[in-house]
Amino acid sequence: MIKYILSGLITFLVTNTAYAEEAAQAALKIDTGDTAWLLVASALVVLMTVPGLALFYGGLSKRKDALNTMAMSVAAFCIVSVLWILYGYTLSFSGDTLGFVGDTAKLFLAGVGVSSISDAAKTIPELVFIVFQLTFAAITVALVSGAYIERMKFSAWLAFCVLWFTLVYIPVAHWVWGGGFCMKLGALDFAGGTVVHINAGIAALVGALYLGRRRDTALKPHNLTLVVLGTGLLWFGWFGFNAGSALAANGLAGMAFLNTNTAAAAAALAWMAMDWLFYKKCTVLGMASGAVAGLVGITPAAGFVNITGALIIGILVGVIPFLVIAKIKPKLGYDDTLDAFGIHGVAGFMGAILTGILADPAINEAGKGVIYGNSGQFMIQLIAAGVTFVYSGVVTFVILAIIKATIGIRVENEDEIKGLDETQHGETAYFFL
């Protein structure tokens, strides 16, 4: 008996000593500067969703639908925050199953401790990497709502968040960032042009077509002050989004930071110029839309292109999405309420493709574009964007069909006329005596 007790005690001591040594080795690899920066970057991306996107979308909506629109962003963030911990992280970033999705080794964050380090980010604690990636997943789901507002049941939106996050976001994130087939192919996506913006943009378009047109399809922003405030918070938070994707406090993060600001400013100016050319006025809404388009367009390229590349991307995504929204959308007749596809889908696709052309190996040796001698990168980018386009579109359609067949997807006409704030939440954004 004493023999077995001593044997067990020795095994316990040896095992715990091994764990302690492993934790000590991991602690030596952790860089406190990188860790501090990623904690801040994560908080900045949270700010993008709540309150940034909520205010931006809420200000663009009709007054009677403002709270409902904001609630869609808040609810998406809360749902994804929980599901990411339960299974989202492990299926996105742990292992690889046929290049399509991760494994279940880290369900409920099993095996992740305060000293754990992910292979994807070796100088920060894995817990910090987990929360940073959580913020990307949350805002991607929330972005889709911009095409669905003013006519979708709130219960249907909650179901959509769960299903779309699980069946669409997780696989695409794994393909591009978690070791899946796009990553193995060599696709470049520094901070989410494919994973976030193309993905959400196509889902927005499919949903807009599936839900059908609103009774009043006019864009009637009830509070442009909130739109400007939301734009500022998005712009501010986007530095965490893009510069944080360097996963270190270094020169690459600085380059991504500068590229982000430059592209946003250039796109805002380009959109203003298009406003002036076609309508003889520079609208505040146009400036805000241009800035967001620039932020979207530079996202996949932020850590791959030089400052000239950032300017080129900014100008182009200030012009082409404007034309899609102002000229092509009215002719096609689809009701993308807040132009989630027009900005995120179009500018995201442009950014992804332009990354394959403009990626400068002097900025980041991991990426070399067409103009620097890698002619194959364009096709790789096109494949990654195309596969995401098709997969997200098809699965989004199936999800919407399932929701419609089970709990219903669209509010009654009377509820839409009265406003979703009152009919879905029993509240109003403004009370006038």
Image (tube, rainbow, N blue to C red):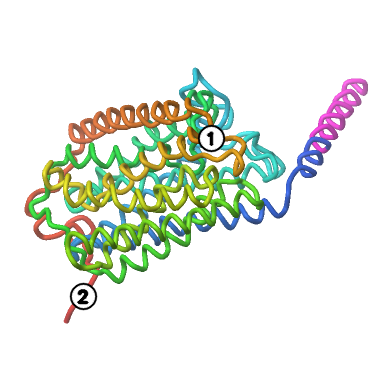
The residue wearing badge 2 is 431
| Mark 1 residue crowding within 10 angstroms, few (<14) / some (14–19) / many (20+) | some
Residue 224's tag is none
The amino acid type, in three-letter code, at marker 1 is Tyr
Q: For residue 123, what is the image quadrant?
A: top right
Give the Cα separation between the discs numbered 2 and 1.
Answer: 59 Å
The residue wearing badge 1 is 372
Please determine whether, in this image, residue 432 is positioned above or below residue 48: below
Left or right, 86 with respect to 351, comes to right
| Magenta part, dominant SS | helix
Comparing 339 with 222, the one in front is 339
The amino acid type, in three-letter code, at marker 2 is Phe
Left or right, 204 with respect to 188, comes to left
| Mark 2 residue crowding within 10 angstroms, few (<14) / some (14–19) / many (20+) | few
Which residue corresponds to the image point at 43% horizontal and 57% vertical from the top-left? Answer: 48
- Residue 94 position, x and y percent, is 57, 29
Q: For residue 228, what is the image quadrant?
A: bottom left
Quadrant location of the C terminus? bottom left
Which residue corresponds to the image point at 60% horizontal and 55% vertical from the top-left? Answer: 254
Q: Looking at the image, can residue 68 be seen?
A: yes
Number of numbered markers = 2
- Residue 138 position, x and y percent, is 42, 47
Which residue corresponds to the image point at 15% horizontal and 59% vertical from the top-left? Answer: 419
Quadrant location of the N terminus? top right
Question: Is 17 a magenta residue?
Answer: yes
